Image (cartoon, grey):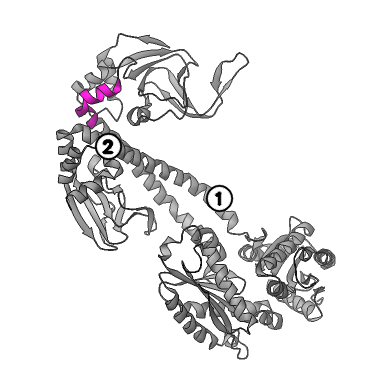
Amino acid sequence: MRTITEIDIPLVIEYFKKNAIFSQLPDDDLAVLAKFSGYNRYKKGERIFEKGNRSRQLYIIASGEVVISSALETDYRGDYSTTGRDIARFIEGEMFGEFEFFEGDVHTAFATAGEETTLVSFPRNDVDPEHIFDEYAHIFAKIYHRLISVTAGRQRLTHRLISEKAGWLEELKKQMFFDKLTGVYNRMYLEDELAKNFAPLGDRFSLLVIKPDNFKLINDTFGHEAGDLALQAIAGKLKSVLRETDFAVRYRGNEFIVVMPNTVLDEAVKHANLMHQTMNGFDIGAQMKRESLFQTFSLGVASYPEHETDILELVEKAFTKVFEQREAGGNGVRIAQAGGDELLNFLKNIGIFSNLKLSELHLVAQRLERLHYSKNETIFKEKQEGNELFIIKTGTTSVRIHLTDGSEQEIALLKSGEFFGEMAIFENAPRSATCIAAEECEILRLNKDDFFDLMKRSPHAAISIMKNMLNKTTDRLNASGQFVAQMVKWGEEASLRAVTDKLTGVFNRRYMESELEKRFEEAQKNGTPIVMVMADMDFFREVNEMYSHEIGDRYIVEVAKVFLNTFRKTDIVSRYGGDEFTILLPNTNLTVGMAVNEEVRKNVEKLDFLKEFEGPDLRLSVSLGVSCYPETASTLQELREQADKALYEAKHKGRNRVMHAPLK
């Protein structure tokens, strides 16, 4: 680097004017900045600053190019060069390093001259930045004001991008978190979403686990399609008896969980008994278009925080009560056991005022207006004009933006000590979001004119406030940017998760339903055979009840592994629900289909993992029903019905066998 002491002040002023942060300053103020600036010349490849170093300079490129890189490498001579992981490139007239200058942060990357380059640096190396801040506070108050305005504009653009992209994520969530058969939430919603954040359920809430007694007999007696109709009927009846704030989750096979927000144990028990009475009087047989069948139910009740402080552990606590009730014969409910100075003191503990002297806090306090908002009351709406900054004293505030489909998306929940609405003070633009009191709130309001008056009377105080405000606003911008990137990544992962069974890794019922018709039509069009298999694990109920639910899940996983290892990668293996699987074998005739399913049966028969645990000696096996187009079925409906009937026959004849539908 070569430093040049002589500087062309009018030319430097023109450089400053080209940048948004300085463009609105008068020439006299810019002349002060130019007076403390310097010229530095760099050769190609020469380092301007190092990653991890701290400096209080910003740079404007007078000529040449600067490369910002996240990492470096050395060549055989020991010279440094960029690795190709370039973050940004700046050319003549552009500025960089402004955030390190204003916030005093360390550099998070390397800056290198991309070619022979001349930079204007402010301040030059022989000038103390703190001295300039102190002597020319009125200038830097204007600069901080403009810097926040520019950052706020970037935040506004980010909000718009989130608004435009949020709709397709919501659709993916619907696919991921709702059970297609019953229309209630699924297990993934409980474990992936609710378990991570159950604060919206309130300080005290309860769970009910509901399990039909002897439900497997319905599948074994009437077939799986009848069982599906029964589950739909149970879910429909369950939804009809829920209170407005309650919601249901289909957890495992025929088991449901009712989540009851803001509900103490006594109230939950009362509602559980009412629900049990109503559900037991429900004729499931009529819903299946068969003779009357009044299904009984076992219920378990547990509450937070009396019984568990983790929601998944709370679920298991309620499940233990269900199993206790079933061991006792089922059909019942079991419950788990078990002003003035005050304002100044508040302001001192708020981040944006933390560096102010007591006298400066007084100036701020004099300009604040106290407001009270009821729960759900609107503080301001998106696109409204406004000129106030708000600080939350008590309560919480929801920040929301409108989506393109007309709905709203909450992007932040602000609590005591946080601020919002600052864009209205720093730029003349409509509100970029809607803010609503999430609960009863006391809020302090600072008017734009009062803030500008503070800037005139105490520029040092205004700079301190704006510097802390800039840090927070920058964090929000970074968080929003990361959210946009995560939206895309999450969406790609969600697309796969939406069609995959979480426990086993095979496809789920939703994917099988979407592929069935398409694959059958392809077989008809191409004149190729296709085999459909319905498989049901033998002795699954006994494993659950004689060992544990966890061992039952292990049984499902081990059988799924056999399926994946035996069938081809082009075959579609899906977990249809509980211990039931459906498999589709394209380009496969009945003879080959029977042979490969016999191999599957033999491999399942070899499973011996139960030896690891204490319990009765059970021989594990699987029953399989096979149908084939065109050898046994002419239509997709026939293909499905025949596979189900063949499975029923395999079960009826003693289990652990493969049966196929009659030939046409």
Residue 559 has which mark? Answer: none
On the question of residue 212 being in view, the answer is: no
Q: Residue furthest bottom?
A: 291
Q: CA distance from mark 2 to mark 1?
A: 44 Å
- Closer to the chain start, of discs 2 and 1, is 2
Q: State whether residue 332 is above or below residue 57.
A: below
Q: Is residue 240 magenta?
A: no
How many C-alpha atoms fall within 10 Å of the one at disc 2: few (<14), some, or many (≥20)? some
The residue stretch that appears in magenta: 127-141
Residue 251, by quadrant, is: bottom right
Q: Main secondary structure of the magenta part?
A: helix
Identify residue for label 2.
355
Residue 614, by quadrant, is: bottom right
Three-letter code for the amino acid on which mark 1 is drawn: Glu
Which image quarter is the C terminus in? bottom right
* Residue at the image point whose x is 71% and y is 76% from the top: 641
Residue 327 position within the rendered picture, expressed as x and y whole percent measured from the top left: 64, 81
Q: State whether residue 141 is above or below residue 639.
A: above
Which image quarter is the N terminus in? top left
Residue 492 has which mark? Answer: 1
* Residue at the image point whose x is 30% and y is 17% from the top: 127
Q: Is residue 319 left or right of residue 538?
A: left
Which secondary structure lies at badge 2?
loop
Name the front one of labels 2 and 1: 2
Residue 479 position within the rendered picture, expressed as x and y whole percent measured from the top left: 42, 44
* Residue at the image point whose x is 22% and y is 19% from the top: 32
Residue 166 position within the rendered picture, expressed as x and y whole percent measured from the top left: 44, 53
